[in-house]
Amino acid sequence: MSQNRFIAELRWQLRELFQAFTEFRLYRTLAAMAVGIALIGVAINGIVIPQNMIAPGVSGISLLIFYVAHKPALGLIYLALNVPLFVIGWREFALKYLFISICGVVMLSASLELTREVRIPVPDPLMAALIAAVILGFGSGFYLRLGGSAGGLDILATVIRKKFALPMGRVFVAVNAVNLAGAWLVNDLNSVLYSALFMWVQAWTLDRVQTGFSQRRSVLIISDHPEQVADGVMKRLDRGVTFFHGAGAHSADPKKIVYTVINMVELGRLKELLFDIDPEAHIVAVVPWKAKGQLLLASNTGRGFTAEMDELLAETRKGRGVVSTKPGVKLTHVREIAAEHDHVAVIGENRKLVIFALSEVPILAKGQGVTLQRYKDGGMADLVTLKFEDGLTWAMGGDSGRTRVEKDLMPWKVARGAAGRLPPNGFPRDNKF
């Protein structure tokens, strides 16, 4: 990253951070972190340590050191382990997220010290593992759902994913495997078994708290009556909505695309609502809603950004503006970003292809985004996210249903904003993935 670009990015992030201090959302997140982290401290000191179990992530590494040395204090060990992680990863995150993460690390360190004398008597180790997992999972999920962070393994896993294209899940598995191996050396096999059960139930509980017990779907609706559809969704389904501003490919007429989140029970009610208001309306995209889920938004000019699904909902009839457009600029692509995807492939109408790291695309709440691909003439034809090591996949012509995979993507891997080069042989002539 050039010095000028770094300075411009830093200024933008400082403005975002200072703006956050004027909004209620930041203080709500910090309050949720205080509650959730207090529960984590109670679970670790009250149950995990008396049962000689190991927690997942950096907390588990801290416990291994604590079991061996019995000093310094567990909270100080956790704080010390996070310092190098922030030193390594500070340039990989927005300042707002770093501020929240630092607050979370300090809170958890303090919580581990303030609850040091807490003990929850649970004589049965199996029951202890289950209770501790539920408390810790609920505490973690409670603040993560509202955008909180307590540093730790999230920082390390994100840095490794961005620098080495290694999925975050593998980093979590590797670190937790080391934690369990350490539990075997420090304690005994029973400790490993109960710790493994504890980690699994904790992860399940955290996921349930984040996403809820009823699976949700994010829905994009194209209708000639978007205002009435949005009003009906808010009044009859009691759901918030957001408007995406798009345009018809042939007519170029501007359209408002309605975005909302529903559960599967409400899907039938939504269809009934659309039948009453606009029978010709189309649900053009139904994708799983996920806490921390992201969408990649891009315009016909090749500019775009990623947006958090949680940030796209609004509670007003007018919806919430997300993409800032100018005359001749239209939102043309909305793509869900899979958790394991680490790169973006963009092809222009000039049939030039570029592939770059997903980490180069900023996460914004609103705006025009950044240049994904540079064009001399024409604009963007299509884009897709992918896992780099899996290659680029596209459908072959005809009705065969066959696909082709190009594994060697290095000839097209460039920095974001490049012009690109012609795609692999056999790529569709319509320039669509």
Image: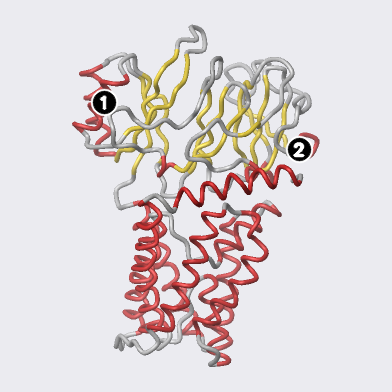
Upstream in sequence: badge 2 or badge 1: 1
Q: Of the residues shown, which amino acid type is indicated by label 1? A: Lys
Label 2 – label 1 distance at C-alpha: 44 Å
Q: Where is residue 88 in the image (x, y as percent from the top left)?
A: 67, 64
The answer to whether residue 133 is above or below residue 322 is: below
Secondary structure category for the residue under label 1: helix
Q: Where is residue 181 in the image (x, y as percent from the top left)?
A: 58, 79
Q: Of the residues shown, which amino acid type is indicated by label 2? A: Val
Rendering quarter of residue 244: top left
Residue 118 is tagged as none
Q: Please name whichever residue, 49 or 244, is drawn nearer the observer in this view of the structure.
A: 244
What residue does disc 2 label?
414
Residue shown at the point (41%, 41%) measured from the top left? 288
Rendering quarter of residue 279: top left
Q: Residues within 10 Å of mark 2 (few under 14, many from 20)?
A: some
Secondary structure category for the residue under label 2: loop
Residue shown at the point (52%, 76%) measured from the top left? 60
Q: Where is residue 352 in the image (x, y as percent from the top left)?
A: 74, 23
